[in-house]
Image: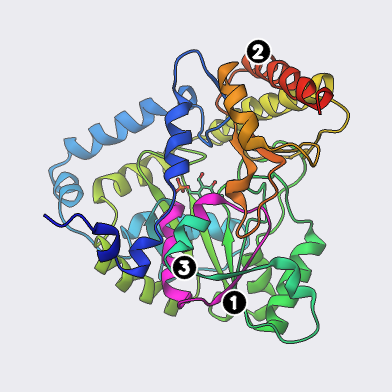
Amino acid sequence: MPSDWDARFSPYGQRAGGAETRAFLRLVGQPGLISFAGGVPDSNLFPSQLIADAHARIFADPAQMKTALQYSMSEGWPPLREWIAQYMRGKGVPCGIENILITSGSQQGLYLCGRLLLGESDGLLTERPTYLGALHAFAGNNPHYGPLSALDRDERITAKAAYVMPDFANPTGESYSPAQRERLLAAAAKHDIVLIEDAAYTDLRYEGAPLSSLLALDAGRNGGIEQCRVLYCGTFSKTIIPGLRGGWVVAASPVIQKMGLLRQAIDFHNSPLSQMVLTDVATRLPQSHIAMLCETYGARCTAMLRALSEHMPKDVTWTKPQGGMFIWLTLPETMDSGALMNEALALGIAFVPGAAFYPGEPKRNTLRLNFTACETDTIREGIARLAGLIAGRTVSL
Ligand SMILES: Cc1ncc(COP(=O)(O)O)c(C=O)c1O
């Protein structure tokens, strides 16, 4: 038996990362722990009955059952693609089924974008910090990361693509204003780069009016989706459930066709049963479900922001999101949130130290708090404890 597996892995395989994400996810359900670490929706709010009924309806109809249990198309089940095309048209994106690829969560959408666009060491621009899972999705390509601000330069830049989350970013919770969106599109056109738009949290808005996606704006500027430079990754994970792994990519049809071929090589397609269930649930889910999620999560966000204002020392700052799942904390420069994490765990609190969200040199005095998975009382209690710990550390510096 070979014992030198690391040496046998390809460079692509060797770069697979993400062990820390798994460690944090393991903390999510630990009894007695107040976890602000996960990025998960509250499972008490899942539309479970609708999902059970959808399965029952499919298995009660022999023709549907056979389709659900058979191999299917790599681009995805046509009725689900049609539902998504209609949903995207409702968001101002003029698209048809030929512009939609169903993916196993938007995580796979990001992976496919990286696989399709990025050659070894190609330039990729991101915010700093950015979504940890995107760094994992792109890791095998070994991209050469640069800051998104490079787009403001006048001279030609060599980056091939930029990865952005215009609405309620993970980990900061921040969004781009309409003017920032327009500037980003203009700069991407000037430097001729592709934009990977991650819209995971778009529908979880607790304040303010919805803003147009980069894809919608780009289609408006250029006269249609076939002329767009944006690859849009969407997901059912945050508004329905993550467990059926339903995501999608919307892009110009040549991109979708090539991604379909990549998908064929990976796993052929999403489970047809899952896709049929998602179609059934998405069609029947009342608007009031998303309104209920926004009301519940919005109240938790407000509770966390209030608790932070009440308890945190003056030299700690944080973002004030209008949606999504996260608040981003910046501690005094000299503090390391990685070291703080062990002490917090001893007090029964978990968060994600910020360093993991940086491509390249991290800012270690940062951390991410999730507010969707705990009830408001638990949030208040957890933040009071965490603030006490930080205040003690600040004083002893
Ligand atoms: C910003 C962002 N994009 C994509 C994903 C992937 O989610 P999923 O694969 O469940 O759609 C996540 C998950 O937390 C996320 O936070």
Q: Residue at x 37, y 44 (%)?
A: 278
Between the C-alphas of marks 3 and 2, the distance is 40 Å
The location of residue 216, given as percent across then percent down, is 64, 65
The image's colouring method is rainbow
Let me know if residue 371 appears in the view. Answer: no
The location of residue 109, given as percent across then percent down, is 44, 60
Q: Toward which corner of the image does residue 61 lie, by quadrant? A: top left
In the visual, does 206 lie left or right of 170?
right
Let me know if residue 172 appears in the view. Answer: yes
First along the sequence among labels 1 and 2:
1
- Residue occupied by mark 3: 113
Magenta range is 106-134
- Residue occupied by mark 2: 377
SS label for mark 3 = helix
Q: Looking at the image, is 266 positioned above or below residue 227?
A: above
Q: Residue at x 58, y 81 (%)?
A: 227
Q: Residue at x 29, y 59 (%)?
A: 6
Tag 3 near tag 2, CB within 8 Å: no
Q: Residue at x 74, y 76 (%)?
A: 187
Number of other residues with Cα within 10 Å of mark 1, as a class: few under 14, some 14 to 19, many 20 or more: some
Indicate yes or no whether the magenta region holds residue 127: yes
The amino acid type of the residue labelled 3 equals Cys
Q: Of the numbered discs in the image, which one, if any, rests on residue 224? A: 1
List the single residue furthest toward the right: 314
Between the C-alphas of marks 3 and 1, the distance is 20 Å
The amino acid type of the residue labelled 1 equals Gly
Quick check: is the Cβ at mark 3 less than 8 Å away from ligand 1?
Answer: no
In the visual, does 150 lie left or right of 225?
right
Q: Toward which corner of the image does residue 25 lie, by quadrant? A: top left
SS label for mark 1 = loop
The location of residue 89, given as percent across then percent down, is 56, 61
